[in-house]
Amino acid sequence: MRISNITILFLNQINFKKMKKPINQKTEVLYSLLQGEQTTMSIVKLGVCNPTSAITFLRQAGVSILCDNQPHKNKFGRMVKFGRFNILNKKQATNIYNNLIK
């Protein structure tokens, strides 16, 4: 049996309708990361006061999170960096998410 790229893409998708809603800031961050790439500012816009702490907690819980630091020139002309976060193993992260919201 030959598996196409579309089948693989379908198998890697997460059914968010069956998942419970986040109950705190840490699960909110994980839920948003499961939906796709997030930046530091997008996590703050979710209402998370300290994204670094939430990411650190999730990494300690076993979630493989990759951070790609992007340079950016701020409004004062200074070079600053912001993080783009991605989950490497969504299936494992989904299992951890389900354990955290129990």
Image (spheres, rainbow, N blue to C red):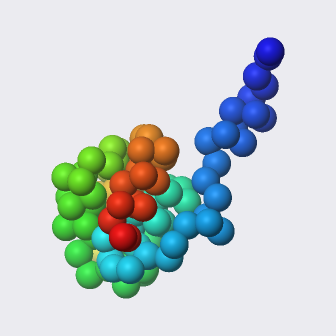
Residue at the location (19% across, 67% down)? 53
Q: Position of residue 50 (x, y in %)?
A: 23, 75
For this rendering, which residue is in front, 55 or 12?
A: 12
- Taking the image as drawn, is residue 71 in sight? no
* Residue furthest out toward the front: 102
Q: Position of residue 21 (x, y in %)?
A: 50, 76
In the image, is 79 to the left or to the right of 41? Answer: left
Residue at the location (44% across, 41% down)? 89
For this rendering, which residue is in front, 22 or 42?
A: 22
Position above or below: 86 against 78: above
For this rendering, which residue is in front, 90 or 40?
A: 90
Q: Quadrant of the N terminus?
A: top right
* Residue furthest out toward the bottom: 47
In the image, is 11 to the left or to the right of 22? Answer: right
Residue at the location (72% across, 42% down)? 10
- Taking the image as drawn, is residue 100 in sight? yes
For this rendering, which residue is in front, 29 or 14?
A: 14
Position above or below: 58 against 28: above
Position above or below: 58 against 11: below
Q: Position of residue 2 (x, y in %)?
A: 79, 16
Q: How many discs appear? A: 0
Q: Position of residue 98 (x, y in %)?
A: 42, 61
Q: Quadrant of the C terminus?
A: bottom left
